[in-house]
Amino acid sequence: MSFTHKHILGIEQLAKEDIQLILDTAEAFKEINSRDIKKVPTLRGKTIINAFFEASTRTRLSFEIAGKRLSADTVNISGSTSSVVKGETLEDTAKNIEAMAPDIIVIRHGHSGAPHYLAERVACSVVNAGDGAHEHPSQALLDLLTMRDHKGSIEGLEVAIVGDITHSRVARSDIYALSKMGARVRVCGPGTMLPIGIERLGNVEVFTDMREAIKDADVVMMLRIQMERQSNIMIPSLREYARFYGLNPTNLQLAKADAIVMHPGPMNRGVEISSAVADGTQNVILDQVENGVAVRMALLYLVSGVESMQTK
Amino acid sequence: MARILIKGGRVISPAQKLDDTCDILIEKGIIAAIGKGLEAKGAEVIDASGKVVTPGLVDIHVHLRDPGLEYKEDIVSGTLSAVTGGFTSIACMPNTKPVNDNQTVTSYILKKAAEVGYCRVFPIASITKGLDGESLTEMGELKDLGVCAVSDDGKPVSNPQLMRRAMEYARPFGLTIISHAEDLDLVGSGVMNEGPVSTELGLKGIPWVAEDAATSREVMLAEFTGAHLHVAHVSTKGSIEIVRQAKKRGVNVTCEAAPHHFTLTDEAVRGYNTNAKMNPPLRSAEDMAAVRLGIADGTVDAIATDHAPHHIDEKNVEFNIAMNGIVGLETALPLTLKLVEEGVIDLPKAIDLLTSGPARALNLPVGQLQEGGVADVTVLDPNLVWTVEAQRLKSKSKNTPFDGWEMKGAAVCTIVAGKIVYRRG
């Protein structure tokens, strides 16, 4: 089948078949990352701009490496060094980037909807690398690839996502992706961190008791407590949060014996996840990071419209 | 001044309980006669057969942006937009630059409106100086100068003690307190209605309780002080119910609803449409239904647009940082008539909500047709079908969520003080 999306704005717009194709394509790219010479000519002559208007280390690095391994020319701009700090509007920034004729813009932005805004105003492809509390599609796809690697199939999986659901774009994208692939999602967090109507986004059940949420789960995904995103009236203390919503060796036993533990990073050790679990045998956190490069290679390749993967 | 004879229209003036096919003769800016088969030699005749003739429409919630924000709107463009929409009287909010918190700004608005405006303008002064929420304006003198009410619209008075004192002080001067009822602490950094749509879009929500809590407080304070409270742009089911109950127990309270709140829901925000961003925000379908019910059962006294012009540069940005508000003067009439079409209210009720209702709410000497009274008249064609083209609006700003909408009903002739100020051509 062929991929018809020019942009990757969110998982919401993707069909099950699209997700399947992205994961299969990523699977094929994975092997390149273990070669001695980690480079193929697939996107030679293409220009990719990684426009990160919000701080990011992992995602930006991952997109940059993905582009370079496909032989694209990658250029990075960040919010703190761009004209944004000089008061330029996103539209003007977009038009200026556009004038330099890139093929793909990868955008991370603090405002929900910014990639959609950009996509309406530029001729090239736009890939959403995280917008506000809206979506983070490449993260969801690498999560799915990791689950598929370890569980064989996504369908039928019980996936618990625990943490600040309100502010989490990862949770939203994962809910869409997992629901489309036939998994069931349990979201869990303090009452202040569960947004109205989250259950309407997919195959979702809402919990406030973490023990119930992770009971017999196949996958336990812990979200980072984003201390920089909220005032201190959302939770009384990190100490109390860790007690009720932190994953530790004791409560992890409630999940299935072969459950895997995931985290989109960066982790707050001792808060949402104890070091014993983060470094324990069930964790697949670095597999997620590794898969991130392959998934992003797949996304860049698929939106580029280039006909052959040229993996040789 | 020319004589005008409006012939053969369905004349509706709810204040007079008038709904009959008859003629209106206008002489020297005054309604000289209302009756059947009127003749007047040399008068300009307006054939109103098949049309509806009403008191000039009244909008008690308009942001004219003049002085200081003329790049969005000014008194000329704003009043032109008003008469195009059929309005002959508008009350303008004080959040200009400088704020209308003093005699100089009030005088400026009145003078400019009289000299170059297309319709009557009734200035609303602020409750507090500079909208700072801390000290009262000189309301007594402002009232003498011609302000029709006081309001800190857009920047609600958060201190309940100050609101109490404002009500107590305003009451003996016969000044209405107009409240933009929102608890700003509960609004937080919200940018749209809090609900499933905000969750899906990943946008921060403004919960209904932010409005209900504030409306409740204002009603209690009005009950305590005996002042007249007018609640602006009621948008939630709870607020409607609070006002309904308050009226039942005799509290001196009135309220208004905006066309966008009885026409659209927060679903309109999808796609991060900044022309669906306003304050209070577009609410749920349940809230919209409650506002409609409030309109039907008399809880809502007036339809008011909250006409809030913003420059394209202030809307053509990410949703989070876009300005709140939409223009409304040129779309209010057909959207109100849509309520008639949909059976929510009948035509005389719709006219009441656009004329005598708002005039009563702010005690304005307009909004009715009577012999010897001022000749502010609107002739409207309830069946005229037209399409909204934002770029062709008379307002300087084009921020409407109704661009491209097919509308039914429009003003075809607007008369202010016996002078034709607008004719649909």
Image: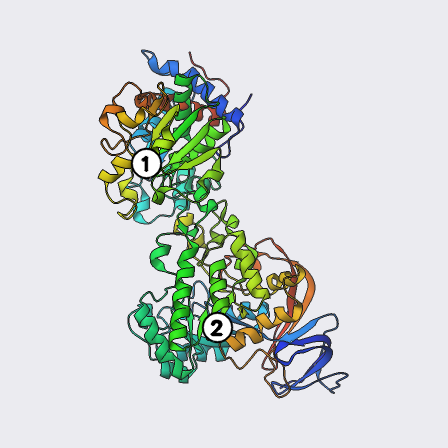
Neighbour tally class for label 2: few under 14, some 14-19, many 20 plus, Cα within 10 Å: few
Amino acid under label 2?
Arg
Q: Position of residue B22 (x, y in %)?
A: 73, 79
Front residue of B298/B354: it is B298
- Disc 2 marks which residue? B249
- Whether residue A102 is visible to the viewer of this picture, yes or no, is no
| Chain of the residue under the numbered disc 2 shown in the image | B
Q: How far apart are marks 1 and 2 (CA)?
A: 62 Å
Quarter of the picture containing the C terminus of chain B is bottom right
Amino acid under label 1?
Ile
Q: In this view, does A83 lie above or below A60?
A: below
> Would residue B22 be found to the left or right of residue A90 on screen?
right
Regarding mark 2 in the picture, which secondary structure is present there? loop
Front residue of B228/B132: it is B228
* Tag in front: 1 or 2: 2
Q: In this view, does A59 lie above or below B228?
A: above
- Disc 1 marks which residue? A77
Q: Where is residue A15 in the image (x, y as percent from the top left)?
A: 53, 29
Quarter of the picture containing the N terminus of chain B is bottom right
> Would residue A229 be found to the left or right of residue A5 on screen?
left
> Would residue B309 be found to the left or right of residue B131 on screen?
right
